[in-house]
Structures are given as structure tokens and as C-alpha cells.
Amino acid sequence: MKKQYLLLFLLTALLVQCKKLEQLPEATASKEAVFGSEKGLELYANSFYRMLPTANNIHTADAMSDYAARRDVPRFIRPGAYSSNISDNTSASAYDLVALGMMTNDDWNWGWRSLRNVNYFIENNVDPKVPEDVRKSYMGLARFFRAFFYFEKVKRYGDVPWVSRAYDVNDPDLFKGRDSRVLVMDSVLADLDFACENIKLATDPSRSLVTKWVAYALKSRVCLFEGTFRKYHTNLNLTASSAAWLTQAASASKKIMDEAGFKVYDGAGATGSYRKVFTNPGPVPEEVMLAALADPALSVLHAANWYNTSATTGVRFNFIRTFINTYLNIDGTPFTSKPGYETMLFKDEVKGRDRRLEQTIRVGSYKRLNGTTLVAAPPVFTYSYTGYMPIKFSLDDTYYDTRDLNNNAVPIFRLGEVLLNYAEAKAELGTLTDAEWAATIGALRKRAGITAGLTAKPTLVDPYLQTKYFPGISDPVMLEVRRERGIELAMEGFRFYDIVRWKRGELMEMEWNGMYVPALDTPLDLNEDGVMDVAFGKSTTRPASVPSTVTYINVSPIISGAANAQRLKNDTFGEITWLSNIQRKWEEKNYYYPIPQAVRTTNPALAQNAGW
């Protein structure tokens, strides 16, 4: 890896010295030296990897999603708070900008630098001195990254200009308008097909390089997105083509399942396997296909612990209770089928559930290393608003809780997602069999310790899931596939665009609710270790009944003359609610991101997305 970073640095230095890539920088290699040898192609191709998300990009990307309560309401879903003028949005959380692909001065927004870099390679990778199969392999890699680039653009903006060559400043198409979604996505699919067919690299022990299986995984992801988007966004008049895209998604997924040799990792048992995929120092090779690696020697680290434990860093991401209720009981039955689940205390509701719950949030059994001592670590209300405090990417040692110190690898592509893509595509097509259910949803639930419902498709609708999340879906198979996707991929950066493609943006308006509180001024022991952890009350001073060691949360309607954002639903008891006093509104325009006004001023041929 050190060698790869050095090569990438040298190549970047070579490229940025040119105002135009066609010009040769002084005292550097010629174009022929770069494109005339396999080593030169490798050097250049390493620059493409800068387009991939970092570990921090991934583990923070769900900060704007329907299941995330946080310190503030995203401006994107506050009426009138967001605009096409980037300067108006400067107070938006950086995590929202990542989630929406709006990193200013970068290709995550409306930048095209990375695309030009890829297109320049594609145009010039023609030197016959390099064997054809080698050139095709690197061409496949370049087209993988072009497809990746355009997929991100289409998710955000819909129609965008399709650019297949390296423009210079005098190119007549430099200020062209937007091309149709059909043209762009057909071109993306052609790039992916070429990549799958021609990338020679099939195995990479480091899980840091794009292999042919990663190309198939991206194809699986892209085709599922496009197929469902076209199916549910009927206003596009593209519904008739959705099945073809879903078929492609299923085909790409099945290719990986049958031939790639990956499996659902279960080496740490039901209580540890799932989370190990996200906390291991190196990628878990059985399941992870491509990862954002950490390397302490190179100071390449990330901040998952800091983000998930600090009261001041990040957005204080917590899960809401409505989502936590979707985790099944260990016997495969819905948790919400239990009588009295609505008033169940935290210490009880987290027991006997899908084992992924205890590997995603802090529950009673959770412990952390503090120095050399292993200590109980219940939810901390100086961080959490709801009580459902995430641990999925965090390390169980307080050492990592300050600054960027995490050294665990973060998956970018893994088999778990591929199985879900396959199951969803087949369910949408109405062709998912019991055997396919067992190989996908069943396999993931088996790892999670669930004991029933693993070998046959469900036949009964869960009314809670249907009512709260998908009232338009009456197929029990589709409901369960969507439940599974939310749980298995929680915090991995998929959720916002899942609800976008399903046309369920209204879920972003869901109440931010937390654990049930039975009474005021009554300390609660969240992990049953005999130590009281938190109490909720309305006193401006701590009541005598609440020891000084207990975190005291004031839920009065008014605090210091201002409305209090943290309340109990029934005033003196009930679920915690957070920020219900600030309106959240999903509008049709929110299915796309606005093209920055400054860009449209420069290029008036770019039409704005409706509503912006």
C-alpha cells in the first residue's frame, strides 16, 4: 500500500503541473512514457481511486436519513431553508453535504475534474506497444470509474450532460445542456458491461483495488437503483424499462454469488460476526470486496469513535425508536407483535432480538475498555437524544474517542449488499423463490441468530412495517426485503437514496422518537448493572430523588425562556421526542438536488430541476 500511495502522489504531481493535460510539464515523463507501458498505465489508473468515498464519507453518510435523529434538522428538508445558491447553504452540516454529494470545490458537487481525468486516459490508452488485453483491462478500470462518477451525478441531479471525451477550454460542447437520463444511464451500463468483461484482476487480498467482482457489484447497485427509480417515479414515463434494469441487477448479483467465492462472514458467531465486518483492522476477506483502508503508519485514519461518542463533534446521530422497532425477535416474529411493546423499557425491549441490534447500538451487555479496565457502557445522554446510540463502526476502547484515531477498515462493497440487491430485484420482478430467499435474506438473518423464517418466503404482512413505512406495498416478501435492507445496511450510506428511489421521501418527516420513559424524576438503569444512568424531569435544579451520579435531562416545555426540543410525548411520561418544534417537509423537488445557480449563470443551457 505504501508503494501505491507514493505512485499516486507522483502521478498527481505530474498531472497537476499542466494547465491542459495535452501539454507536457517540464522535466516530467512524456505522454508516450505514460501510455506506452503497463507501468505507466498503472501509475495513471491509481489516480482514479481518489474518486472513491473515504471511511469518514461512508460512516457519516446516513446522518441525513429517515432513521436518524440528530442535533439539528437538515436544511435540505426545512421549508425554504435550502436553495440553488451554494452560499445560502453554508450553514448546512458537512455530513448533509456528503449525503447529498454537495462537497463544494470538489467533484461531489457539480465538479467534473475527475471525469476529465478518466476521459483523457480513455482517449490516449491506445499505444500498441502495450498488449491489447492489458490495455483493455485498464480501459475497463477507467470505464468503471466513469460509471461510478456518473451514477453519483444522476442520483443527485437526474439529467446531466454526458461527456465522453476530455474537453479543452475551446471545445464547442463545453457549455452544452443536459442529456436525457436514458442516454446517460444507457452509457453508464455500457461502461459497466465493458468493465465486467475486461478487468483482468479477479482477486486482491488487500481489498483496496477494483476487481472484476467489484465491477459486477457496482453494476448490481446501479441497476437496482435505476430499475426501482423508474418503477416508482412514474412521472418519468420510464416504467416500461424498469424490469430490464432489475433483470440486469439480478444477473450481476447472481454472477458474484455463483462465481466470486465470497460468503456471509460468520466466524465470530451470532453475537459478533456482523459487527466484526465493520470493526476489524483489515477488511474481512470472506465478505468484503472493496474497503476504505486505514493505515496508522501513513496516518490514514478515520473518526468513527469520535463521531459516535462526542457531544460536540458530528451531528450526534441516534436511531429513532420507530426504526428500532423493525428489528425482529430472535424467533423471526415481529417485535411489534408483542403485547405492550409500546411501553416496554429500554432494558427489556433490546432483549431477545435480532443479534444485529446489539451490534448496531449500545444495549445492556455492551462494555468498553477504559484504560485497562472493561466497564459497562450504557447509552450516554450527553451524546444521545433518543437512547439508541450507535456502535456499528466504533471500537470498544475509549482511547479512540478523541480525534481521528480509528484504524478499522470500512467496507465500500460487500457481499451482504449484493445479496440484498439480488433479493430485491427478484422480489420486484415477482420471481424470488424460496431457495433464493434462503440464499439471501435467510443467510443474513441466520448470521444474526434468527431461528425461523430462513428457508421460505413470508406469507403474512407485518402491519407495523406496512403502516409506518410502506403503506403502498401489500406484498409480504417486498416488505421483508425492505426491512432487511434497512437493518443490514444501517449507517452504511444507502438509506437516503433508498427512500429516494422507492419514492418514499415522506419518511424524512418521521417523528424523532426515543426510548419510553415511565415517569418523571425516576432514575432508570439502562443496562441492569445496579447503577442508575439517567432520569427525566422538569425541575430547574436536580431533585433529591435523583443522585448526582445520574444524568438529569430536563423535559420542561420551556427552558430559560425558550421552547425545549427534548420532551416526553405525554408530557410527564412516554417516548422521548426530539426537535418536534422544527418543521420538516419533504417536497417533490427534493428527489433531486438543485444545480448550483453559479453554474447555470456560467452555462445558461443547463436547465434547473423542477421546484428549485
Image (cartoon, rainbow, N blue to C red):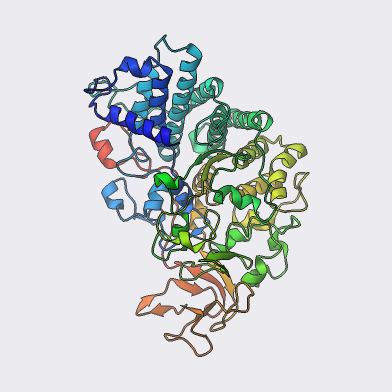
Displayed quadrant of residue 572: bottom right
Q: Is residue 174 left or right of residue 588?
A: left
* On screen, residue 35 above or below 344: above
Q: Which of 405 and 552 is in front in this view?
A: 405
Tell me which residue sits at (56%, 20%) in the image: 197
Image position, residue 139 (x, y; %): 45, 20
Image position, residue 149 (x, y; %): 42, 33
Q: Is residue 540 left or right of residue 376?
A: left
* On screen, residue 177 above or below 366: above
Displayed quadrant of residue 378: bottom right
Image position, residue 489 (x, y; %): 57, 48
Image position, residue 434 (x, y; %): 77, 39
Q: Which of 601 and 330 is in front in this view?
A: 330
Can residue 589 be seen in the rendering of this structure? no
Displayed quadrant of residue 48: top left
* On screen, residue 470 above or below 337: above
Tell me which residue sits at (53%, 84%) in the image: 521
Of the 4 image quadrants, the one containing the C terminus is top left
Farthest top residue in view:
128
Can residue 451 be seen in the rendering of this structure? yes
Of the 4 image quadrants, the one containing the N terminus is top left
